[in-house]
Image: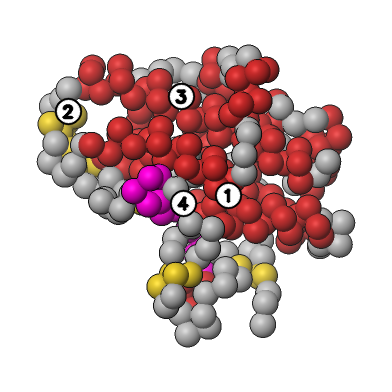
Amino acid sequence: MKRIIILSLAATMLCTTSYGWGRREHATVAQIAENHLTPKVKRLVTKYLGGRSMVYYSCYADDYQPLYIDLGWEPSNYRRMAMFPHTYCVDGDCKPPHHIKDGDRYVKNTLYFIDKWSRELKEQHGAMNDSTRLVHLALIIHAVGDMHCPVHIRYPDDETLGVYKVKLGKREVNYHRLWDADIIGKYNPWGYNELARQYDTFSKHQAAEVVEGDIYQWGEDAARRGLPARRYKKGAKINQQEFMREFTPVAEDLICRAGYRLAALLNDTFK
């Protein structure tokens, strides 16, 4: 039976663990998106989030991973029903699938769920109860950020997601963690509001180009832009200055693209 069981919310929403960007990065994506909502959609989204901003719920999916939502998994695979994927697969051309099941094999595909949840909101948001609508929105806000993080993309020649140690200067670090939060959070003093202001510099024409296409085309674009980051394998020695010079702009660009795309998705959903 299809069902959604909603967990109650805590008074504060803190990303105590980082699974796709860190707390500040997810908040930045949400703030950029909120800045680009139409007035009508911003009022609706704020209403559906119980008067809270999108930033407040930007880390919801990391804090509440045990949400029991029907993801289409088989009942015999109960534990997998309790999670939604924060990652997605691509082929050798960086093209993601449009499904979650390939024969008897399940395919991790957060793009599928973003598409599914947004269509359900578009078609049913007026009839949904408050908690179901809120969870749909909160998961979309988070997942659009996740899909733009290079270590949340499963490339055919490397599905490790960067979960291994590399040598960054004199430090041994987890490469996944480096992309989740350190690449932005470790090296600047700004909060999410200032990051959003600094990153949101695309012209109207450039921003319009970013949001062209659908969620799967956005996933392909993010995979192509993030692919160079995956050339560092387990045990790699990384020159810290060279790495930051090359990849900080990549991370900033992907976070900004995520914000524009999240706004475009919500503007279309609630137009």
**Dominant SS type (magenta):** loop
- Please, is residue 253 above or below residue 91 in the view? above
Left or right: 181, with 85 as reference point = left
Q: Name the residue under label 2.
A: 238
**Viewport quadrant of the N terminus:** bottom right
Quarter of the view holding residue 177? top left
Q: Mark 3 points at which residue?
A: 252
Q: Nearer the viewer, mark 1 or mark 4?
A: 4
Per the image, label 2 sits on a secondary structure element best described as: strand
* Residue type highlighted by circle 2: Ile
Q: Mark 1 points at which residue?
A: 60
Q: Name the residue under label 4.
A: 96
Image position, residue 4 (x, y; %): 67, 70
Compare marks 2 and 4 and give the one earlier in the sequence. 4
Check contact, mark 4 vs mark 3: CB within 8 A.
no
**Viewport quadrant of the C terminus:** top right
Image position, residue 14 (x, y; %): 53, 44
Q: Which of marks 2 and 1 is in front?
A: 2
Compare marks 1 and 3 and give the one earlier in the sequence. 1
Quarter of the view holding residue 102? bottom left
Compare marks 2 and 1 and give the one earlier in the sequence. 1
Q: Nearer the viewer, mark 2 or mark 4?
A: 4
Per the image, label 1 sits on a secondary structure element best described as: helix
State whether residue 249 appears in this view: yes
> Would you say residue 91 sits in the magenta stretch?
yes
State whether residue 87 appears in this view: no
Mark 2 and mark 4: Cα distance apart in space: 29 Å
